[in-house]
Amino acid sequence: MRELPCTSESLPVSLRNADERILFAGCDSIHSSLRGRSCDARRVLVGWLASGVELGVFRVAVACAVLATLPVTIFHILLAPTLSRLHAAGNRAEMQRLLTWTAAAMSGVMLPVAIAAWFIGKPLIALVFGAVYADAWLPLFLLTLAQLIYAAFGMGPILLAMCDGERDLIRIYLIAVGAAVLAAIPMTMAWGGAGAAAGPLVSASLIGLMSRRYARRELGVEIMAVPARSGAPA
């Protein structure tokens, strides 16, 4: 009786996809937990360093901002297995094309959301939650702007998660989240909920920049929607 090879390539496509999605789910749960702890820390800072009113306003902004995270999250979930397969196949050219168009698409989706938060965020929040929470528009805009920054770096963090960079990604998140919380302390003291909402601008920028550095150095790809340099970047 002929023995079948027991490799990932010999598995049915459905099983390989399931395995890739399990890997993504495991990595994503760790990253979501770290981001969740960061959000909890900002709530504590607002309640401690500002007022109860500011805390209520900040909570409304965070609740509204959850919707702004959906487009990026959907891109990450749908395309993570494809990145894993391209990496395993060593197909850098196709991986680069995927990274470029997803970064452009994610930015194109998030830019109108950020613009809408700036121009109609205040009247919309007042309409839905009441005039007392209208000031939540500024924290909401800052949280949405942070998500736009995150989108500008495309699949960067997910690229690390699916292409053997899990440990580097966890280190990146720990550094970025820690820096964001520390930066949020003086900003919360000065500007209340708006200052706390500015913290994610720090973490999104650091996560994106450090993920980009890893992708260029280790994988030789560009995660942003800009022309990739020829050769493997240093």
Image (cartoon, rainbow, N blue to C red):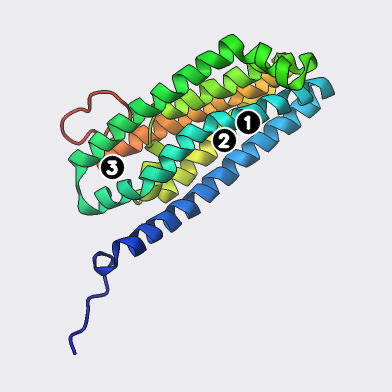
Q: Secondary structure at mark 2?
A: helix
Q: Could you tell which of marks 3 and 2 lies nearer the N-terminus?
A: 2
Q: Which residue is mark 2?
A: 177
Residue to which mark 3 is pinned: 218
The residue positioned 77% from the left and 20% from the top of the image is 54
- Kindly check if marks 2 and 1 are in contact, taking CB atoms under 8 A apart as contact: yes
Residue 8 location (% of width, % of height):
28, 65
| Between discs 3 and 1, the one toward the N terminus | 1
Residue sticking out furthest to the top = 119
* Residue type marked 2: Val
> Residue shown at 20%/36% (left/top)?
232
Percent x, y for residue 122? 66, 12
Report the Cα–Cα distance between label 2 and label 1: 6 Å
Q: Amino acid at mark 1?
A: Val
Which disc is residue 118 wearing? none
Q: Nearer the viewer, residue 178 or 211?
A: 211
Instruction: Indicate the position of residue 151 as horizontal and vertical percent values.
Output: 43, 28
Q: Residue at x 36, y 27 (%)?
A: 105
Residue 10 lies in what quarter of the image? bottom left
Mark 3 surroundings within 10 Å by alpha-carbon count, few (fewer than 14), some (14 through 19), many (20 or more): some
* Quarter of the image that includes the N terminus: bottom left
Give the numbered dot on residue 181: 1
Could you tell me if the residues under marks 3 and 2 are in contact, i.e. CB atoms within 8 Å?
A: no
The answer to which of 142 and 77 lies nearer the viewer is 77
55 horizontally vs 153: left or right? right
Q: Nearer the viewer, residue 171 or 132?
A: 132
The amino acid sitting under disc 3 is: Glu
